[in-house]
Image (cartoon, coloured by chain):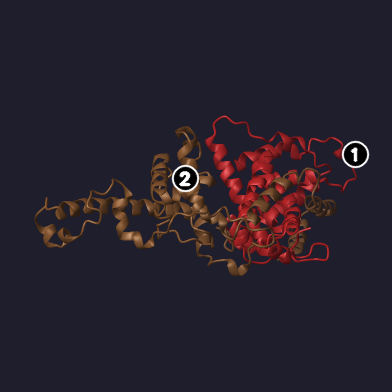
């Protein structure tokens, strides 16, 4: 997956960016398929069930402005995350202006309410559970964990995206991971459910 | 601190179970696309295809067209001002306005037609007649069509690619202005086409052809880095434009 450095499993896609900029459809599809899953999961922590719509908006903008991009794979990931986060912030501002609209937390709340969890192997953590646990962190920590650890952007890039100093991003990512490790030390991760609501409340 | 080091430091605050689960959690959160996560792919790809089919920086042309339109409004205002002066000059030339204007030489300006200029743009045309190109047959034909439409259809057609060049030449999207322009074209095909100097065409296409109607064949008109103008225009229109990412 996307990590700090290109690996055999996930090589840097810098050449695909240039090819896509020349109009190659398959190159762009490759970029989309590589980045979209984590982008969507990141957006879920920001806007909940509206993440798909926001991701679509972000990709439309990315496809429109692709020819203006200059840089390598790392810069491209940073740019796509920036675009996605801007669209998410626009979306949240729009939601706040709209009176009496239900907060779309239901789908997220449904995810960890899977009571088969206890029956699973102790170490097993499903993707939904993992995302719910990360999403339950305070927002600055959740974003730092996503951008720094999952998407693998460097601290400086994360800082630019989040409007913070690189040191603050490192601290937030560290605190987030530490809190996750502590929480995971308990016998079951089912306790995540009540905290999701509060985290989403904080985001909005 | 690398991501791995970050993980190790953080995991030291938990027992062995917490450490193992943290690693499993991060791995689970990073799994490749699951069903449904690529649901929007075809919409995104359709957008990409649309963008890729455009000439480089075509996306900016709507902004440029808006700017050009604003400028042509100014040119229009200038024309109106010139019309006013022209009227005064005509009055001076016919001897009805004695005084300083006559002394300035305006009174000696020969009246080209010997009759008052028709209201509207033609009064200003002598000044720019050297720039006038005869309207291409396509414009004349579209004008003929346009004049055959009823008013409702003209309003519906505002901004439509088929009439965009007529609107550009008429300096207005107002159907009445476009009809007026077309009336002039029909009466005299040498009515200036695209006289505004503020909108030089980015791509070589025949006068009067809308910029978006540049049907480059796939693989032929694809953008290349050498086609790209300076980055200057980007930051204006795209707050998220790289490399600073708008932050």
* Disc 2: host chain: B
Which element type, helix, strand or loop, lies under badge 1?
A: helix
- A91 or B238, which is in the foreground? B238
| Residue indicated by mark 2 | B143
Would residue A34 be found to the left or right of residue A62 on screen?
Answer: right
Chain B, which colour?
brown
Q: Is residue A94 left or right of residue B83?
A: right
Contact flag, marks 1 and 2 (Cβ < 8 Å): no
Q: Which chain is red?
A: A
Per the image, the residue denoted by label 1 is A119
* Residue B98 seen: yes
Q: Residue at x 65, y 55 (%)?
A: B53
- Decide which of B144, A48 is in the foreground and name it: B144
Q: Residues within 10 Å of mark 1 (few under 14, many from 20)?
A: few
Query: Which corner quadrant of the image does residue A191 belong to?
Result: top right
Indicate the position of residue B65 as horizontal and vertical percent values. 47, 53
Q: Chain of mark 1?
A: A
């Amino acid at each position: 997956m996307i990590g700090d450095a290109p690996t055999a499993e996930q090589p840097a896609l810098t050449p695909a960016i240039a090819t896509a900029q020349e109009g190659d459809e398959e190159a762009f599809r490759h970029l989309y398929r590589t980045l979209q899953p984590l982008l969507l999961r990141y957006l879920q922590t920001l806007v909940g069930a509206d993440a798909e719509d926001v991701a679509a908006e972000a990709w439309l903008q990315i496809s429109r402005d692709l020819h203006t991009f200059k840089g390598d794979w790392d810069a491209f990931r940073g740019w796509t995350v920036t675009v996605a986060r801007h669209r998410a912030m626009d979306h949240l501002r729009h939601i706040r202006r709209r009176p009496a609209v239900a907060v779309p937390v239901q789908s997220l709340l449904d995810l960890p309410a899977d009571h088969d969890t206890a029956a699973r192997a102790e170490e097993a953590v499903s993707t939904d559970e993992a995302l719910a646990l990360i999403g339950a962190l305070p927002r600055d920590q959740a974003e730092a964990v996503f951008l720094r650890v999952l998407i693998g952007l460097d601290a400086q890039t994360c800082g630019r995206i989040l409007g913070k100093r690189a040191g603050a991003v490192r601290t937030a990512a560290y605190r987030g991971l530490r809190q996750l490790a502590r929480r995971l030390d308990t016998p079951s991760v089912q306790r995540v459910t009540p905290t999701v609501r509060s985290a989403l409340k904080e985001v909005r | 601190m690398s991501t791995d080091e970050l993980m190790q430091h953080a995991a030291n605050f938990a027992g062995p179970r917490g450490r193992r689960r943290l690693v499993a959690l991060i791995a689970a959160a990073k799994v490749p696309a699951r069903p449904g996560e690529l649901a929007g792919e075809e919409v995104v790809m359709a957008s990409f295809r649309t963008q890729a089919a455009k000439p480089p920086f075509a996306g900016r042309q709507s902004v440029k067209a808006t700017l050009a339109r604003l400028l042509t409004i100014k040119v229009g205002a200038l024309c109106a001002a010139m019309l006013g002066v022209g009227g005064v000059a005509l009055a001076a030339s016919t001897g009805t306005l004695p005084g300083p204007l006559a002394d300035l030489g305006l009174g000696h300006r020969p009246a080209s037609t010997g009759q008052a200029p028709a209201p509207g743009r033609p009064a200003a045309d002598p000044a720019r007649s050297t720039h006038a190109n005869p309207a291409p047959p396509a414009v004349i034909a579209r004008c003929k069509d346009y004049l055959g439409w009823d008013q409702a259809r003209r309003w519906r057609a505002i901004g439509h690619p088929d009439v965009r060049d007529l609107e550009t030449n008429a300096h207005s999207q107002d159907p009445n202005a476009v009809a007026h322009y077309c009336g002039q074209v029909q009466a005299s095909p040498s009515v200036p086409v695209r006289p505004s100097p503020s909108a030089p065409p980015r791509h070589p296409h025949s006068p009067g052809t809308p910029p978006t109607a540049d049907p480059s064949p796939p693989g032929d008109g694809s953008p290349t880095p050498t086609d790209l103008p300076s980055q200057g225009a980007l930051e204006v229109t795209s707050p998220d434009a790289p490399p600073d990412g708008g932050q």
